[in-house]
Amino acid sequence: MKAARIFHSVDSVDDFALVKRLDRARADAAEPQKLRVLIEVRIAPEETKSGIEREGLTALADQVSTLNQLDLQGLMCIPPFLEDAEKVRPYFGDLRVLRDDLERKLGKKLPALSMGMSHDFEVAIEEGATEVRIGTAMFGTRASPRHPTG
């Protein structure tokens, strides 16, 4: 698994099979530093979103905590895209509450909350985000890839 050998962080783990592969690959790479991971939580019931369901979060976090090559540092989510950023606020608040509950259960600080994108990052920060994804704000909208016609 190339990601475990070349990156210092994977911000979207959502199942134990993936976590085990990352842990093994990091061990095989003989990297002295643990791989920082964030668990991606499926915070909204949208078919297009990935992540662990809320009900499975504690179990996955417990499993990640047993591995020697990974360092669980927090949670990540991608809420629904809503034009009105205020309507996204509850999703960010939910992730913060999940993180706070998980810290109590694990007895470990989880300082990273990765949530918010270019159109809603201000609200995400107000709700506790420590990391935001603002590529569109910095670089502009990406052109859609062209599909060959045949």
Image (tube, rainbow, N blue to C red):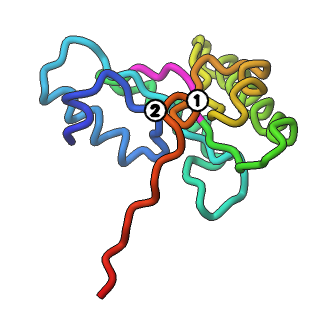
Q: CA distance from mark 1 to mark 2?
A: 8 Å
User: To which quarter of the image does residue 46 belong?
Assistant: bottom right
Q: Which secondary structure class fits the magenta region best?
A: strand
Q: Earlier in the sequence, mark 1 or mark 2?
A: 2
The reply, left or right, for residue 17 in relation to residue 80 is left
Q: Residue 116 — which label? A: none
Q: Quadrant of the C terminus?
A: bottom left
Residue drawn 39% across the image and 31% down it = 10
Q: Which residue is mark 2?
A: 11
Q: Which residue is mark 1?
A: 75
Q: Which of these two is toward me, 84 or 48?
A: 84
Q: Quadrant of the N terminus?
A: top left
The reply, left or right, for residue 61 in relation to residue 126 is left
Horizontal and vertical percent position of residue 60:
52, 38
Q: Tell me where the magenta segment starts and ends, as one range.
A: 71-76
Horizontal and vertical percent position of residue 75:
58, 29
Q: Is residue 47 above or below residue 108?
A: below
Amino acid type indicated by mark 2: Asp
